[in-house]
Amino acid sequence: MVNIFGQYKKYGIPLWQSPQFLFLIMGLINISSSLTTWLIGNRFISNPQVVTLIVFSITVILFIIAFIITQSFEKLVEANRMKSEFVSIVSHQLRPPLSNLKWALEFLISGRADPVSEKQTEYLKILKENSARMTNLISDLLTVSRIETAKMLFKKTEFSLKDLIEEIVRVSIPFGQASNVKINFSAPADLPDILSDFSQIRQAVENLLDNAIRYSQGRGEIDIKLAKMNRGIYFEIKDSGVGIPKVDQKYIFQKFFRSENALKYQTQGSGLGLYIAKAIIEKAGGKIGFKSQEGKGSTFWFTLQINE
């Protein structure tokens, strides 16, 4: 029995991508093809039995093709759903032990258990840094899983994008200084508020800024600016880093993709930051894009509607 809306909810995909919806469309195409064949056959073939046989044969062939395509597509969608659920389950299971590891390392570094030598403290800090990287990766994987299963919640509130970015920049300054990168931010004083998900927009901006710092390769400046544009707000972040090779630019928002020069410079990253940022901005009803030249840096931008 065809259950289009059941599949739509089960797989968390747009209605038009539902395998049974596609099967229904192909069925309508099949009927149209059969009627067209019958009309043409009646015009050029005098024997009605031959016409019927031709129409029947074409209908059966088209039906079999449609069924095979639909079944194959359904298996792919099901495999993708199972993969997303697996990632989500594993990520959730990894979070508690990593949190315990974090607190245990902080406790040991503090010296409250036993005195810790300078060399031991250095090793413990390395472990803490790597556990933080794993925690961030797990958080990104959970976000990707929610995006793919259409379970990413979007709680809209009214807030100042300018204030949010000022806070993000303030928190990121130590990371920038450690990378020998200066962060500049400018915005007009009278920018209106936006109505969107505060935490999601924060994550998108943090991902863009994190990328800009990492790919600046320890030099230069990052310029962030906000401006009012028509009925929206325009955000731009410009770096003077390694840039993106032209051949890689069409893949830059794909998950797990990292350009060749990023791998060459051994820059840390999972290839999920831009994928997540794009999904969040588009979920918020905005647009995102970039321009880049290898060796001369990149400029990423997005627009969001203001709350009027």
Image (cartoon, grey):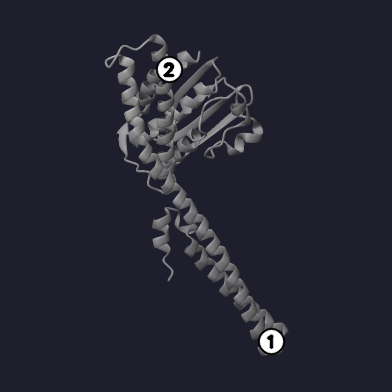
Residue at horizontal 43 percent and vertical 44 percent from the top: 87
In the figure, residue 233 lies in which quadrant?
Answer: top left
Mark 2 element type: helix
Neighbor class of circle 1 (other Cα within 10 Å; few <14, some 14-19, many 20+) is few
Q: Position of residue 20 (x, y in %)?
A: 48, 64
**Dot placed on the residue nearer the N-terminal end, 1 or 2:** 1
Neighbor class of circle 2 (other Cα within 10 Å; few <14, some 14-19, many 20+) is few
Q: Amino acid at mark 2?
A: Tyr
Quadrant showing the C terminus: top left
Quadrant showing the N terminus: bottom left
Q: Which mark is residue 285?
A: none
Extreme residue in the top direction? 118
Mark 1 element type: helix
Residue at horizontal 35 percent and vertical 42 percent from the top: 154
**Foreground disc of the pair 1, 2:** 2
Q: Which mark is residue 123?
A: 2
Residue closer to the observer: 27 or 299 = 27
Q: Is residue 6 visible?
A: yes
Q: Position of residue 38 (x, y in %)?
A: 64, 81
Q: Can you say whether 248 is above or below 188 in the image?
A: below
Residue at horizontal 52 percent and vertical 16 percent from the top: 221
Q: Can you say whether 143 is above or below 128 in the image?
A: below
Image position of 229 (left or right of 31): left
Q: Amino acid at mark 1?
A: Val
In the picture of the structure, the residue carrying the numbered disc 1 is: 50
In the figure, residue 250 lies in which quadrant?
Answer: top right
Gap between marks 1 and 2 measured at Cα: 83 Å
